[in-house]
């Protein structure tokens, strides 16, 4: 498990973390890129919206894998939110708005996404394609 303080400057730690995971799990470049963007968005949301940039609160990040799937969990210490009421950023009235696309991007880049603990926890699943030998 990796734990970071909820200061926005700490979002930059995600690149190093993903680089380490990509090496450890021998991830292909496209999966590494999808993981980088998804995890950066999830951690940014946890720091900014979940923990309200309160550096005394932490964001926990976990990764696990099976032979067919990579699972990444991001959890904050906030009060949660109603993830079922997120506006669609692709609608005509939202398309030119700045921001509000993080969850949409995550949903598009990972294979499965689940919110738990009242929106305080997001679980991202990435399918692993067996390498051809």
Image: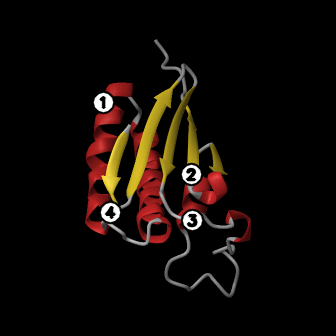
Foreground tag (4 vs 1): 4
Q: How many marks?
A: 4
Does dot 3 land on a helix, a strand or a loop?
loop
Q: Earlier in the sequence, mark 3 or mark 2?
A: 3
Task: Choose the circle earlier in sequence order: 4 or 1.
Answer: 1
Q: Residue at x 26, y 45 (%)?
A: 16
Do we see residue 115 in this rendering?
A: yes
Its colouring scheme is secondary structure
Q: Residues within 10 Å of mark 1 (few under 14, many from 20)?
A: few
Give the side of residue 79 with respect to residue 45, left or right: right
> For numbered disc 2, what is the local secondary structure?
strand
Q: Residue furthest front?
A: 56
For disc 2, the neighbor class at 10 Å (few under 14, some 14 to 19, many from 20) is: many
Whichever of callouts 4 and 3 sits on the residue coming sooner in the sequence is: 4
Say the numbered circle drawn on residue 79. 3
Cα distance in 3D space between marks 4 and 1 = 31 Å
State which quadrant residue 18 falls in.
top left
Distance of mark 4 from mark 3, alpha carbons? 15 Å
Would you name the residue on which mark 4 appears?
56
Residue 131 location in percent, x, y? 48, 20
Give neighbour class at mark 4: few <14, some 14-19, many 20+ (Cα, 10 Å).
few
| Identity of the residue drawn at 56% across and 44% down | 124
Answer with the quarter of the image where residue 23 lies: top left
Identify which residue is drawn at 31% across, 65% down. Answer: 55
Location of residue 100 in the rendering, given as x and y in whole percent from the top left corner: 55, 75
In this figure, which residue is indicated by the disc labeled 1?
A: 23
Residue 33 versus residue 3: which sits nearer the camera? 3
Instruction: Report whether 104 appears left or right of 12.
Output: right
Would you say 126 lies left or right of 40 here?
Answer: right
Q: Is residue 67 above or below residue 48?
A: above
The residue to which callout 2 is attached is: 121
């Amino acid at each position: 498990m990796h734990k970071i303080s909820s200061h926005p400057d700490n979002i930059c730690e995600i690149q190093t973390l993903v680089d380490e995971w990509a090496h450890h799990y021998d991830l292909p470049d496209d999966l590494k890129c999808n993981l980088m963007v998804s995890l950066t968005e999830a951690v940014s949301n946890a720091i900014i919206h979940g923990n309200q940039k309160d550096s005394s609160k932490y964001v926990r990040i976990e990764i696990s894998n099976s032979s067919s799937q990579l699972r990444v969990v991001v959890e904050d210490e906030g009060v949660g939110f109603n993830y079922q009421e997120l506006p669609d950023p692709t609608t005509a009235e939202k398309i030119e708005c700045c921001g509000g696309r993080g969850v949409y991007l995550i949903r598009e880049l990972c294979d499965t996404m689940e919110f738990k603990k009242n929106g305080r926890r997001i679980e991202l699943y990435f399918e692993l394609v067996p390498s051809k030998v």
